Each structure stands twice: as structure tokens, then as C-alpha cells.
Amino acid sequence: MTDEKSGAGTPVPQPEEVQGPRSSDLVSGSGAPRTLEVVEVREGMFGVRGSGDTSGYGGLVQPVAMPGASPRPYGGWFDEVVDVLAEVLAASGVPFDAAVERVVVDPPGAHAELTLHVHRDHLVDVCRALRDDQDLRFELSLGVSGVHFPHDVGRELHAVYHLTSITHGRRLRLEVSVPDADPHVPSTTSVYPTNDWHERETWDFFGIVFDGHPSLARIEMPDDWPGHPQRKDYPLGGIPVEYKGATVPPPDTRRSYS
Amino acid sequence: MSTHTTGAPGAAPHATRPPVGDFEPGIPSFEASGGDWADVAESAVAAAALGEERIVVNMGPQHPSTHGVLRLMLEIDGETVTEARCGIGYLHTGIEKNMEYRTWTQGVTFCTRMDYLAPLFQETAYCLAVEKLLGITDDVPERASVIRVLMMELNRIASHLVCLGTGGNEMGATTVMTVAFTAREEILRIFEAVTGLRMNHAYVRPGGVAQDVPPDLVEQVRTAEPLVRRYLGQLGDLMLANPIFKGRLVGVGHLNLAGCMALGVTGPVLRSTGHPYDVRKADPYCGYETYDFDVPTATGADCYDRVVLRLEECYQSLHIVEQCLERLEATAGQPVMVGDRKIAWPAQLAIGSDGQGNSLEHIKEIMGTSMEALIHHFKLVTEGFRVPVGQAWQTVEHPRGELGVHLVSDGGTRPYRAHFRDPSFNNLQAVAAMCEGGQVADVVVAVASLDPVLGGVDR
């Protein structure tokens, strides 16, 4: 290849010609006040636990609240997607309210994202509807990630799926919550084969069992590793480091402001 | 192929049984074990007993053609690969877990180390996600976005050059490697001038970039650009019409559009099937919608087309770099960090005796004249800023595909959860589809065309 060729080669098809609207067509939420869902209540400050409080902040009570359900209208194309999904699910005999626990539009402002909290029993139905219906067509899955909320009783483990519609230029997020005592989520590999390794990784790091996965083995940690390292109750580990006479404690025992 | 069907009863399962009777006693034997390797070996032994010539080859994790510590488990029949599996995790360093114990700004220092050939993409994607949570996406100064785009596009060229160079080297074309690395050196020199480092930059920060580019940067890039262009021309001359090169690559590692979509494969591999999906066009960030560039595609869906596309993308990146330089000149003197002093980390640096150090003026101000500035500096650096609760998802077009960042904030000064959807991690799932049925020698070519970087795969 020469320089001349790069400048004026054969015309290449550009995304504008073959793709739908851009997902950068920004959507801002409905503007209604943000509702919050308390997942944890923290006390004290600086991460001091189990020792005498000398900070004076021991009485501080701090609820941690994640964004809760959003009221309609959600804004932009969000309403359309939710409506079409409800129709498609109803046509296949799944009531929308049973499948989707709540719809969250967050963060506030012009860069809002749509999150559907899906009940695990209907996760595969929802994925299939989102992939196959021509008005939804979320054909690209960008993997699974886990989040651990140890104090949100009954909903400790979250599996988060990010789907992209190249056809319509849209992105949305599915979130499934399961209790720690029964960490089972159906595998979505039958709909999105790409989630194979992502589900293995989420099993490895969070201990979420994906039922129906073809080979749910650890992927990053050694096969005989005890525990699931990304859980909040799994220590980071580390040793104190001595530097110029002072001792620097390991990161997970340092003062925390969260 | 010899088989050893007898082992000590009750012993741990071994991939290869200890030799019995073949060797003198006392001669050491080396064994591979772990995972389901024992079952694989057992079935191979059972098949051999039936007269099948079936061999399981363990390629890697220490193998020069696997781009790092990738382990390939190949089942071969003669020269044909009948089954290919990947083993990863040899470079897992727990970066995501570590990020939960550092401030939002320090997170940049960690995520830059994931995919070490494309550090600026992780940094930018992470910072864009943090900015989304903070609600300051639209407040990031234009000059900061221009610098980010400039750095990312230079980084894309550097990353593609390593892919082409090492890929050529694996096929015995050492000259391709030396030319590619010489060209990369020009780009790393620019990185060093801007960030002080050749890799692990931690240069992009939530709210902008750490500091402005050196005053003579535009000149430097303009000097380096024709050199890079010349080296790219040499690479094209060396590879694209070379009959040996084409013989090794054309029609090898085929993966069609349906396979790419099912396996979530993005980047040059997807574009080699003819689909022009590029996040820079489909979901622009950092103002990419205002730049003029093409998304090259091909229709062969094989390793050769991916080489052509990577070269073509390098030229397109140079085209974007030229536009960035014009904008840098137009925005000279403008801020490179958001105005909110509660977010903008103090990063006033100057050239000191050691090459780079704290700015004396800044030290003078906080130590000598303004106690409040000192307190503010101290609190912001040790405690960090708080990020509103919620979660954000941001993707960028990484040299290897679509890089996604999922951040969850609990309203504190640290990420509650940071997850990176690395394109290499996802694309490695396509190894089986691309290699099975081909020759053993084609595995090396197919893996090279995926261009996995194991630092990003394992994180």
C-alpha cells in the first residue's frame, strides 16, 4: 500500500449510509425527582470498625441509596423501547410487570441511560425479545458484569448486561438481582453466545451460578481457588510496607471516606 | 505416539502419566496438570487405543506466538486442528478489585495498565464514564477533548503497528517487525514528551487531562508524521503484495458476519466482514462527530483483510491527527481541565532537574501564601472527590474493538465497582471458530489477526 492509495482509494460504505440513528442522540430523563432505593446504611466515618472511635464521627448515620424506579415518561426513545418490549412479551405470554421489576432512567441530565431490572425467571425471554424483534434488535451483547451489595438483603448479587442495537443506535442495560443464598441466574448463552466467557468471569468473581451454561468453570482464577474475589467480603489483601521509617498499611485497611 | 495407561493407584490425575518401563529409573519426568486437562489427556489416550492418531498439544502460556501468556489447547490430527481451546488468567492482577480501594482519580493509574499497548483508551473510557456520573460531560474543555483524541489516535497507530510487526515476526518476516517498531518509537517519543512516560501514562484525568501539552508538540508531531507515514508505506510494500505473505494469510482465520455478531467480536475483525461498525461513528465521544475520517471495511473476512484494514486505519488516524493539530493551534492557551476546583486535581508540573517535577510556583503558593489552597490540595488528593450514586456505561473504539467501562458509585470517593469489557477478552472466544479445521501453522496467523493483549484479557 502506498500513501496515494490511502488518500483516494475506492469509496468505502460509511456508517451513516447503512446504520440507523446514532445513539449519541441524547436522551435526558423525564425531569421528575429522582427516587432512591436504600441498599445500605453506614455508620461512623473513615471506615473505622471494631475499635474505639476517636474520630468523633461515630454517631454518623449515612444511608447509601441507589437510583430507584423512574416515572413515565422516561424520555426520548426509552418509552418506545419499553412499550415495544411489553407488547412482544405479552404476545409470548409473559406479563411485562412480572418480567420487568422496574425501569430506571439515570443519571439525571442529558446523558441518561436506560436500565431494566429484570426478574431472573424471565431473563432469557427478555433477551430473546430484545434481540429478535425488529423494532428492538439489540443484536450485540457487550458482556456481563457483577455487582455485590452485601447489605441489600435478598438482592445481594446483581448481574448486569449491556446490550447494543447497532441497527437503531441504542444502548440499554439489564440488571438481575438474586439473593446470596440462592445465587442462580439462567444463562443467556443460548441467545448471546458471546456471554459465555463473561458469565464464567462473573461466576468466578461473584459466585453467581448461571444455570444452563455449557461449561461454567472459573476463567481468571485457578480452578481450585477458594472464594469469589470481587465480593465485598473478600479482602483485598496486602502487607504493610515500610518506607523511610514509616509503615504504610495495606490499601484495604487505610482510612476510607466512602 | 506412546501411551501410558497405568499410573499409581490413588495418585493425583496427571495429564501425562509417569513413564513406566520406558526409561531408566531416576530420570526426572515433567508433567502438566490442572483443570480438566487430565480428562482431555485420558480421552486422547482412549482414542489412541482405538488406533486414532490424536494428539493434544499445549501451546503456551509461554510461547512466543501467543502474544503473551495465552494458553492454547489444540487437539490435532496430523497437521489439522480438530479442536482449539483457550486458557487465560495467567496475567490476572485484580486491577478491578484494586480500583475499589483507590480514589476515582487514582483509578486512572490502574486502568492504564490493563491493555498495555493501548493505555490511553482505557484512561479515556474510564474518565468519560466518571464524567458521566459526575454530570460534567459537557463541561470538559474543548482543548482537553482534542488532546484526548490526538493521543488516542496516535495510540491506535502504535497499537496497530505492534500487531502488524509481531504478526509479521511470527511468520518469519523480521523486517516487518523492525520497521513497525521503529515507527512505533516515533509515536512513543511523542507520548514521552506529553505525559513523561512511554506507557502507563495516567495522563487523562476525570475532567480533562493532567496538564497541557508542551509548547513545541505540534512541531514534534508534524516532524514525526511523515516518518510514520513512510514506515507505513514500507510495511504495505513489504506485506500486501508479497506472495508468501498472501499465501499464509488469504482465506485463513475466516469468521463471517454472523459469527462476529454471535460472538460479540468488534473492531477490525468485524469490519473485515464488511460491517462498518465503529463506535467513533455510531456513538461519538470526545467530539469525534466533528472530525473527518472514513471507516475502512473489507469483505474477505480473513487474516489478510484484517492486515489491510489495520494499515488503512493507521492512515485514517494520521488524518485525524492532522485535524487535531490544527485545533490544538487554534485553542492554544485554553484550559485542559474543568473549571470546578473540587474535581480538577492539582497537577501543576514543570521541567525540573529530573526531567519533570512539581511546579515551583504552585508549591510557593500553597506553602507560602494560601493556607486554604494547601488544605484544599491536601483534601482533594488524599480524600478525593465524591461521585453521585448511580451507574454509568461508556464505550470507546479501542484498536481491538469496542471497549466498555461499567462504573458503579455508592456516592463515595472510590468506585464501588469498576468493570472493563475488554475487546481482547471477548474476541478470544472466536479462536475456536477461526482455527478448527485449519492447519496448526494457521493458528498462529489467526490469533495474530485477533491481536489479543493478555494484560487486557486478564486485567
Image: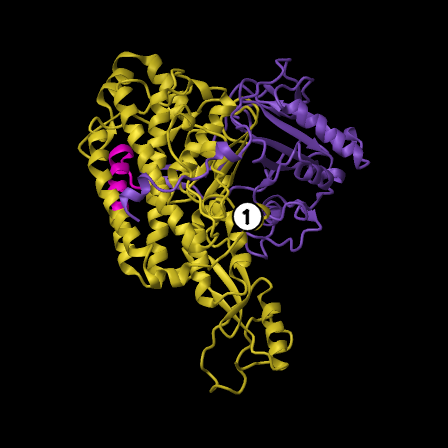
Q: Is residue B93 visible?
A: no
Chain A representation colour: purple
Q: Is residue B70 visible?
A: yes
Q: Is residue B149 above or below residue B458?
A: above
Residue type pointed to by label 1: Leu
- Point out residue A232 in the picture as x, y percentages from the top left corner: 59, 38
Check disc 1 and report the residue beneath it: B257
A250 horizontally vs B225: left or right: right
Q: Secondary structure at mark 1?
A: helix
B362 horizontally vs A84: left or right: left
The residue closer to the viewer here, A87 or B117, is A87
Q: Is residue A37 above or below residue A184?
A: above
User: Is B32 in the magenta?
Assistant: no
Instruction: Return the chain for callout 1.
Output: B
Where, by quadrant of the figure, is residue B111 drawn?
A: top left
Seen at 32% across and 18% down, the residue is: B335
Q: Residues within 10 Å of mark 1 (few under 14, many from 20)?
A: some
Q: Main secondary structure of the magenta part?
A: helix
Applied colour scheme: by chain
Q: Is residue B240 above or below residue B423?
A: below
Seen at 26% across and 18% down, the residue is: B333
Q: Is residue B21 above or below residue B383?
A: below
- Point out residue A256 in the picture as x, y percentages from the top left corner: 50, 28
A30 horizontally vs B294: left or right: right
Q: Find the magenta span and give its range.
A: B183-201
Seen at 61% across and 13% down, the residue is: A31
- Residue furthest right as drawn: A93
**The chain in yellow:** B
User: Is B190 in the magenta?
Assistant: yes
